[in-house]
Image (spheres, rainbow, N blue to C red):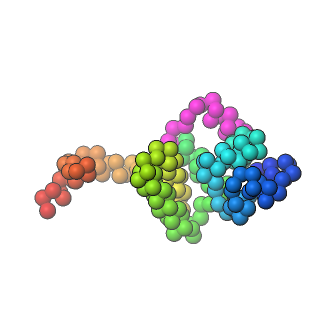
Amino acid sequence: MNKLRETRKIKGLTLKEVAEDTGISEQVLSYYEREEREPKKETWIKLADYYDVPVAYLMGLPSGLVEYIDQLGYLNFEKLHEFIIKWANDRKIINPKNVSKQFMKVTEELGEIAEGINKNNREQIKDSLGDIMVTLVILAQDLNLDLLDCLNSAYRVIQDRKGKTINGVFVKESDLHK
């Protein structure tokens, strides 16, 4: 049983009561409890506040991991990459058969960042960039690729690239002469 359902039952609440109190539909709450959908950061916070428990507890993060994160204060890219893969594996999200579905998650997050940019909403942009990275890490795993290796490969290709920035867009030298 996931922590969302477990916490709701411990508090003696029905899905309907939680939905009425939080403004989150019963159906969506049910998806979260069955782990068919993952709440956004703001929703985790709202539910943790509602149940009066730490977000990390509600998310089911191991206490050792929570303590490690708290002590460190931040995680480097490699450690976050490792934790995201573990988190996705624990939830059985990583599956080579789900490549097209995971790619759709990436594009969904791209739409959210576009909305954030259009509305000049810095918090939405920040959240969307993080979500894009998470979905890309999972997609890379579905494709049996390491996202850090992909990033290294891309950098090796561009590190010595020459070109010119035109209207805010970098155009590589070979495309300038076409």
Vertical position of residue 104 compared to residue 71: above or below? below
Return the residue found at the far top: 71
Return the residue found at the far left: 177
Question: Where's residue 44, x and y in %?
Answer: 66, 48
Q: Quadrant of residue 175?
A: bottom left
Vertical position of residue 78 compared to residue 103: above or below? above
Task: Name the residue located 41 percent from the left edge and 53 percent from the top edge.
Answer: 118
Q: Is residue 93 left or right of residue 103?
A: right
Task: Name the residue located 84 percent from the left edge and 48 percent from the top edge.
Answer: 11
- Residue 164 in the magenta stretch? The answer is no
Along the viewing direction, whichever of 130 and 117 lies nearer the viewer: 117
Along the viewing direction, whichever of 136 and 157 lies nearer the viewer: 136
Would residue 159 be visible to someone looking at this image? yes
Question: Where's residue 166, x and y in %?
Answer: 20, 51
Q: Across the whole image, how many numbered discs are drawn on residues?
A: 0
The quadrant in which the N terminus is found is bottom right
Q: Quadrant of residue 2?
A: bottom right
Along the viewing direction, whichever of 63 and 18 lies nearer the viewer: 18
Question: Where's residue 58, x and y in %?
Answer: 72, 46
Magenta span: helix, strand or loop, mainly? helix
Task: Name the residue located 59 percent from the left edge and 60 percent from the top edge.
Answer: 94
Would residue 62 be visible to someone looking at this image? no
- Residue 75 in the magenta stretch? The answer is yes
Magenta stretch bounds: 62-78
Question: Where's residue 178, x and y in %?
Answer: 14, 62
Task: Name the residue located 30 percent from the left edge and 51 percent from the top edge.
Answer: 157
